[in-house]
Amino acid sequence: MDGQVALVTGGGGGLGSEAGRRLAASGAHVVFADLSFEAAAAAADHAIAQGMSAQAIDLNVTKSASVERAVEEIERSHGRLDILMTSHGFPRDGRLLDMTDDAWDDVLNVCLTGTFYCIRAAARLMTKRRYGRIITVASRAWHGNPGQANYSAAKAGVIGLTRSVAKEFGRHEVTANAIAPGLIETASLRELDTYDALVERAKRDNSIKRVGQPADVAAAVRFLASPTSGFLTGEVIHVSGGRFG
């Protein structure tokens, strides 16, 4: 990936920061983007301290203008954008009958509409150069989870969007694939009161009998972002230890 440029949204979070470092370690210049500039800067600084090429930007994926400005700045500074990973997103769980309009709208706007904005902006540059790797982060929840109607719908939408992009831009040598993680151990997961119960259930229900780590997702991202993945597109890669239904 020497000389390539990658944009990682949600780059200050557990999945985005780990995947971004994996791409940087492979030779790419990585733009860590996050709503929290401080979180993005911490991820970029970590990569730079290890001798990698990186930078941080603040990005609000729910604002089309913010996304367009970010990609335009990348084009001005680097002349290219080879890899897009959209790892932003968050749940607001609750029973459907109790779910507020805001709880629905907030999750759909960030997880689905924000992904659309990022892909649209990046694809303009990728198709022009006739090369690109788009990796979206969905979730095993796309199959449907009780108490997660908003999140499940958003992540199912991300997969439909990704597959549409794969069919539309394949002729431009731009691939698009989704990663659907299972339970991944991140700092935000460890803060939950239900952490222990979630971990035990995940270990019981998957085939590998452990909880996923950000490095597991990063390994899949590294492959999908590589030039050698050029004949793989429109796929959903479940990084869930064998729990995908």
Image (cartoon, rainbow, N blue to C red):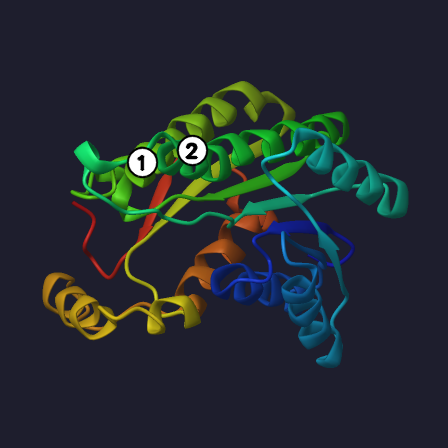
Q: Tell whether 114 sits left or right of 105.
A: right
Which residue is tagged 1? Answer: 150
Q: Quadrant of residue 155?
A: top left
Judge whether residue 232 can be spotted in this image. Answer: no
Q: Residue at x 42, y 49 (%)?
A: 90
Q: Tell whether 208 sits left or right of 133.
A: left
Q: Residue at x 45, y 37 (%)?
A: 106
Q: Residue at x 63, y 27 (%)?
A: 120
**SS of the residue under disc 1:** helix
**SS of the residue under disc 2:** helix
Q: Earlier in the sequence, mark 1 or mark 2?
A: 2
Q: Which three-letter amino acid code belongs to the residue tagged 1? A: Asn
Q: Quadrant of the C terminus?
A: top left
Judge by depth and name the residue closer to the eye, 150 or 212: 150
Q: Residue furthest bottom?
A: 49
Which residue is tagged 2? Answer: 108
Residue 198 appears at what percent x and percent y? 20, 66
Is residue 39 shown above or below 31?
below
Is residue 184 shown above or below 118?
below
In this rendering, the count of numbered labels is: 2
Q: Quadrant of residue 142?
A: top left
Residue 238 appears at what percent x and percent y? 31, 50
Q: Are marks 1 and 2 in contact (CB under 8 Å)?
A: yes
Q: Tell whether 184 sits left or right of 58.
A: left
What is the distance, in whole Å, between disc 1 and disc 2 at their CAs?
A: 7 Å
Judge by depth and name the residue closer to the eye, 227 or 215: 215
Is residue 201 shown above or below 77?
below
> Around disc 1, counting alpha carbons within 10 Å, would you say few (fewer than 14), some (14 to 19), or many (20 or more)?
many
